[in-house]
């Protein structure tokens, strides 16, 4: 998940996650401070929240297809009474199919099902007439919840990369392991973002990661600044105008890059002066978008 508990206090982190253009800044959280609880329709609020138990709790606002009206209706209905089942949730909140599908795909309906595809299978089912009167049934809440949890579908659970892909597709972030952690075992001699502060100034190093930002300010005389995110944080590279022109397509189109060059470590500012740039092989299912400003 893109986040930064080191540079920002908890509530600021929450606000930045809620702001789509602020998500790219949220990195460098260690495993303990980055602990994130289950994201689900039974407990999540609209905004991203921070609490003593969990520094960051995702809010409904991060779900791309969920309308503000739908989220408001969800919260209003939940305030009246907890949802007793997925059928109860569908009947009371009345979201459209795209909203329901996305909630299922990002795991927000796992409180009613054993896994995401199980929930996705159930949201595709139309409400029957007897479902509309579920509130008059004599079943206890526990029994209804147990029945829904045990619902079976012919769909197998998502694999871990598929869950990461679904998170990025539905929320532009993930609470799971960073995509770079999935390919780190095969990366030899490539430093992590957390390794750079202790590396020697002037040493030629290699860095790699998911491109989260490309900047080419008008006042920078053609220099390009690239930010790469890995499982430990952000590393930055500076690209000269000739290097940019020679690698324009790779720099502007590839979601994952490997960059080599001398490490510049001056007055606490760390970056790589790019001398070689290439595409980093990755699983396309876990790529996320970058935030580019020119």
Image (spheres, rainbow, N blue to C red):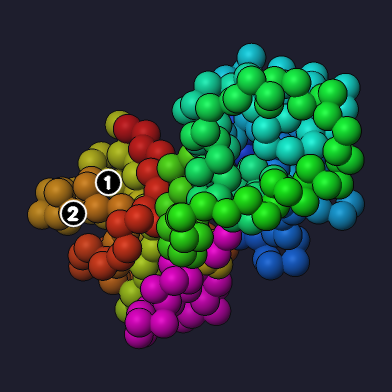
Q: Viewer-proximal residue, 33 or 108? A: 108
Bounds of the magenta span? Answer: 175-202
Q: Secondary structure at mark 2?
A: helix
Determine which of the numbered discs, if any, sits on residue 223 in the image. 1
| Mark 1 or mark 2, earlier in chain | 1
* Residue drawn at (47%, 60%) of the image: 156
Quadrant of the frame with the C terminus: top left
Q: Viewer-proximal residue, 34 or 37? A: 37
Q: Viewer-proximal residue, 183 or 87? A: 87
Q: Secondary structure at mark 1?
A: loop
Quadrant of the frame with the N terminus: bottom right
Counting from the top left corner in percent of width and height, residue 95 is at 59, 22
In this rendering, is residue 287 above or below 65? Answer: below
| Residue at the bottom extreme, as displayed | 188
Counting from the top left corner in percent of width and height, residue 289 is at 38, 44
> Does residue 236 appear in the picture of this structure?
no
In this rendering, is residue 291 above or below 247? Answer: above
Q: Is residue 79 magenta?
A: no
Distance of mark 1 from mark 2, alpha carbons? 16 Å
Counting from the top left corner in percent of width and height, residue 108 is at 64, 43
* Residue drawn at (50%, 43%) of the image: 121
- Labels 1 and 2 touching (C-beta < 8 A): no
Check disc 2 and report the residue beneath it: 250
> Does residue 61 appear in the picture of this structure?
yes
């Amino acid at each position: 998940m893109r986040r930064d508990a080191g540079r920002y206090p908890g509530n600021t982190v929450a606000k930045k996650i809620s702001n789509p253009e602020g998500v790219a800044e949220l990195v460098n959280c260690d495993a303990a401070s980055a602990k994130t609880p289950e994201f689900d329709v039974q407990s999540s609020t609209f905004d991203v929240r921070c609490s003593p138990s969990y520094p960051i709790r995702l809010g409904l606002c991060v779900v791309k297809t969920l309308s503000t009206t739908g989220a408001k209706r969800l919260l209003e209905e939940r305030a009246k009474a907890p949802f007793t089942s997925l059928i109860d949730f569908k009947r009371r909140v009345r979201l459209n199919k795209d909203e329901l599908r996305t909630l299922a795909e990002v795991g927000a309906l796992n409180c009613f099902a054993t896994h995401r595809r199980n929930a996705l299978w159930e949201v595709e089912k139309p409400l029957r007439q007897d479902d509309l009167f579920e509130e008059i049934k004599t079943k206890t809440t526990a029994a209804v919840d147990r029945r829904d949890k045990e619902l079976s579908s012919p769909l197998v659970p998502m694999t871990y990369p598929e869950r990461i892909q679904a998170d990025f597709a539905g929320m532009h972030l993930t609470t799971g392991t960073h995509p770079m952690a999935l390919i780190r075992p095969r990366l030899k001699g490539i430093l992590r973002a957390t390794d750079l502060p202790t590396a020697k100034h002037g040493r030629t190093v290699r860095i790699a990661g998911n491109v989260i930002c490309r900047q080419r300010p008008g006042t920078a005389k053609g220099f390009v600044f690239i930010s790469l995110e890995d499982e430990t944080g952000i590393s930055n590279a500076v690209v000269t105008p000739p290097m940019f022109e020679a690698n324009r397509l790779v720099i502007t189109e590839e979601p994952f890059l490997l960059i080599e060059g001398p490490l510049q470590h001056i007055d606490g500012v760390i970056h790589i002066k790019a001398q070689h740039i290439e595409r980093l092989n990755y699983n396309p299912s876990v790529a996320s978008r970058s935030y580019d400003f020119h």
